Image (cartoon, rainbow, N blue to C red):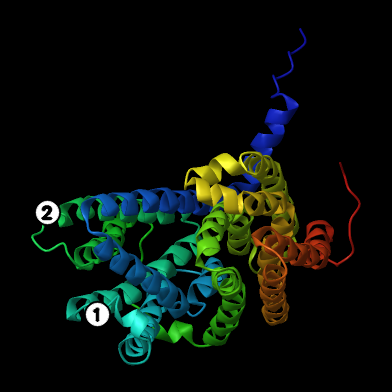
Amino acid sequence: MAHRAAPTLPRPRARLARLARRDGDLLTSSGSLTASTLITSATGFLYWFVAARLFSPEAVGTASAAVSAMTLVGTLGMFGLGTMLIGELPRLPGDRWPLLSAATLTAGAIAAVGALVYLGLAWFAIPGLRTALPGPTMVVLVAAGIVLTAMALVVDDGLVGLAAGPFQMLRNLYFAVVKLVLLGAAALLPVTATGAPILASWLAGLLLSLLLLAPLLHRRGRLGSLRPALSMLRGRTSRAFDYNLLNLSLYLPHVTLPLVVTAVLGVRVTGAFYTAWMVYTVAVMLPGNLATALFAVATGQRAVLRAKLRTALAVALGVGLPATALVAVAARPIMSLFGTEYADVATGALRILALAYVFAVFRQLVVGVVRVLDKVRLATAGAVLAGCLEIAAAAYGGAHGGLTTMVLWLVGVFALEALVTAPIVLWAATARAGGRPERSDR
């Protein structure tokens, strides 16, 4: 009697199952990063919505300015150490937590220096910044917040390097929930005229998110020795410095664009542009997170890069293109959520940015590729040039037209960047280990 053939999965399902087995690490890491971004964005909106209902506008304005400063200076205080951990931790044998602890402690020390510089500038040189520091309590809270922000961000990157992305997502979820609960409790305090209670809830959320994560990691057997081994940073600081330069060259143009809009088109347009820019940033976070995950899972393994990059391209295009097409179609209703004036000013800008998503795919993924291929310094030079072109194009377009014209010029630079980066990404996705492209087997 002939044996019956074993049932097989339908071909699309079989491919998905094979993809999940082969690239589960990439998908899990990028999925965790994307979920963390969504959690942060959604709960951040809710946090400030609740703050606006419970506290005075002056208190909310003071706290939001302080949080912006903490985020900016804390991010700079990472000094590339988080990116260094993503690349180094997967290659380390044995207990890798001493390196993570050392990097976290070092980032905190660098951020402390940055906090002193910022507070000095705010107190003695820039009166506008001093208004966000009404009293010694706010000064202490801002300084502590800068240090905690840098350390928490390094821990997040370290968890990605340890292939513990879901725990990184949980850390951000703890932070989101705890700070919201504490915000409600802060509103019951007798002193609510300043931003100190709001800022205290933010800092307490940061600290408790780290403290709550530690026992969970311990129970799952994922926590090693927390004693920092500063000696493990030797030979890695120059790499961290290179990563820091690349990160800054990518980060600074992003935060500078709203200032360019203010200088060229005025504050009224800036509010609408900033909102559209934030929506666009959320829309294009997928290829950025895939690039980070790609670096984590393929670092030091160029042979692995090709298959992982193919999956990253497929996910970035297959998921991102329909999503951003929907954003383009619904651009006006999306902007109308923030107000009719926002929709009137920035609907066209958001639509153009959303339709330029495919350029962002190659611009973001190439960052992961050059990190895996250890071409960071060359990439930094290219990123600096690209950033200067973006700022110049935005300034020129804004000076010769409105916001839509400015965005068209900006997207023109994005297209030029994609023309340069797409061949690199496609080569890395198709090249054999010896460097020659392979023929497609599909």
Residue 179: which quarter of the image?
bottom left
Tell me the kind of residue under disc 2.
Leu
User: Residue 370 location in percent, x, y?
Assistant: 70, 71
The residue to which callout 2 is attached is 188
Q: Residue at x 78, y 66 (%)?
A: 421
Q: From what the image shows, is residue 279 above or below residue 21?
A: below
Q: From what the image shows, is residue 78 above or below residue 342?
A: below
The label number, if any, that marks residue 139 in the structure image: 1
Q: Residues within 10 Å of mark 1 (few under 14, many from 20)?
A: many
Side (left or right) of 221 relative to 272: left
Q: Residue at x 20, y 67 (%)?
A: 194
Side (left or right) of 213 relative to 11: left
Q: In terms of secondary structure, where does tag 2 sit? A: loop
Q: Residue at x 46, y 66 (%)?
A: 158
User: Residue 25 location in percent, x, y?
Assistant: 57, 51
Q: From what the image shows, is residue 339 above or below residue 57?
A: above
Q: Nearer the viewer, residue 123 or 20?
A: 123
Tell me the kind of residue under disc 1.
Val
User: Residue 301 location in percent, x, y?
Assistant: 68, 65
- Whether residue 345 is visible here, answered yes or no, is yes
